[in-house]
Image (cartoon, grey):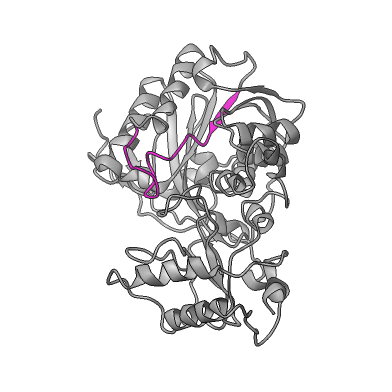
Amino acid sequence: MARNTQLLRLPFHRKTAVWKHPTPTRGAVTTVGMFAGVGGIELGLARAGHKTNLLVEIEPGARAVLAHRFPNIALHDDVRTLRSLPKDTELLVGGFPCQDLSQAGQTRGIDGSRSGLVGEVFRLLRRKRVPWVLLENVPFMLQLSKGRAMEVVVETFESLGYKWAYRVVNSRAFGLPQRRERVLFLASRETDPRDVLFVDDAGEPEIPRDALGRLACGFYWTEGVRGLGWAVDSVPTLKGGSSVGIPSPPAIVLPSGAVVTPDIRDAERMQGFEADWTAPALSAARAGHRWKLVGNAVTVDVAEWVGRRLRAPSEAGRDAGGYPLGDCTKWPRAAWNVGSGRYAAELSSFPVCIPAPHLHDWLQFPPPPLSQKAAAGFLARTSQGSLKFPTGFLDLLREHHARMCSSTTPTPNRRSRGERAVA
């Protein structure tokens, strides 16, 4: 399509105060949740006052959670057999499967057997053009196959008559100790989606340096050759899979030097759920499957932020500025098209910045120590590549491994709620 070459004002960061719920100026909407998982988007939207009238999810463990947590909402099992959307649908939402788009997955692209299911969204929209659509996925889709996945999505929405905007948002912005970036894509037939997604921008906070020994730091014990996922005062992204082929928690180095993994209940809290939200899955799956459900979920607080902005939009979002987009081999972290061409915007992944306790104080449940086997595997992988590690980190892992081998537990220098199990 033709690109508008008019240069807009320079991008800027709109520094906002700590997030306060805006006063609603619009009513709530009726929602259908596609690829609902364990209901992260739907729970967040409900907290903002919206109503869900249909959930679609095929995975048995996730369906068990939805049936228990949303007992009065209709539940359909397969998006491919859903003939049409309910007549009163105003917002269609979905974190469509990311296995074929993520770096942790097989990166087959938008045509993969799972991520290609977004085509079912388009099939339903062709039958009924609902006013709003909200999609969520991993940032890797912005560059996969030289940008083709994103091109398919935006081109299809444009052909269906939708205005669109998207933005990468980090769960850490909402006071949760998880460094989790996701693309939020909002399309509308009614108004400018920038009035929702681009209104708030707090700017990226500074990451403390030399944090090891002062703050808890998270990392992927399943990595060690090409990546580490190092996260200061937080954990890296909770994932439904890993490089060793299993859904698993990240590891945490506590200020004491103890190396632990978070309890599944704290992992649920890191996604904005209450503790034991996924416990109903035990009726349909093994206990370890809960990690996959949590890792594949959409952060509740992120969805709540979108839901509240849907009820309190502002034209201030149109002031974000930007520059015209040409053909993309790697899409920017924020962009839009409201009918005059495609533009990139420079916005941070922190629309708000909600303060939170330090990770080692935030943990509520005793974290088990990283197992001897897991520590040994990680240390073995670190010797297979040229990856650089924070000073002193590998020494701590070796000490932890030695303690686990001798069946002793680490003795922390000081205790916090997150360290009681290993004290």
173 or 198: nearer the viewer? 173
Total residue callouts: 0
Q: Is residue 319 left or right of residue 365?
A: left
Residue most toward the right? 72
* Residue 326 % position (x, y): 23, 40
Q: Is residue 314 left or right of residue 123?
A: right
> Which quadrant would residue 51 be assigned to in this image?
top right
Residue 232: in sight, yes or no? no
Q: Quadrant of the N terminus?
A: top left
Residue 94: in sight, yes or no? yes
Residue range corresponding to the magenta coloring: 90-110
Residue 293 lies, with reference to residue 64, above or below; the image says below
* Residue 265 % position (x, y): 69, 55
> Which quadrant would residue 30 be assigned to in this image?
top right
- Whether residue 189 is in magenta: the answer is no
How would you classify the magenta stretch by its main secondary structure? loop
* Residue 109 % position (x, y): 32, 37
42 or 419: nearer the viewer? 419
> Which quadrant would residue 337 be assigned to in this image?
top left
Residue 412 lies, with reference to residue 268, above or below; the image says below
- Whether residue 92 is in magenta: the answer is yes
* Residue 302 % position (x, y): 59, 47
Residue 333 lies, with reference to residue 156, above or below; the image says below
Kindly identify the residue that appears in the image at 72 percent across and 75 percent down: 420
Kindly identify the residue that appears in the image at 36 percent across and 63 percent down: 227
Kindly identify the residue that appears in the image at 63 percent across and 49 percent down: 301
Kindly identify the residue that appears in the image at 52 percent across and 46 percent down: 316
Q: Quadrant of the C terminus?
A: bottom right
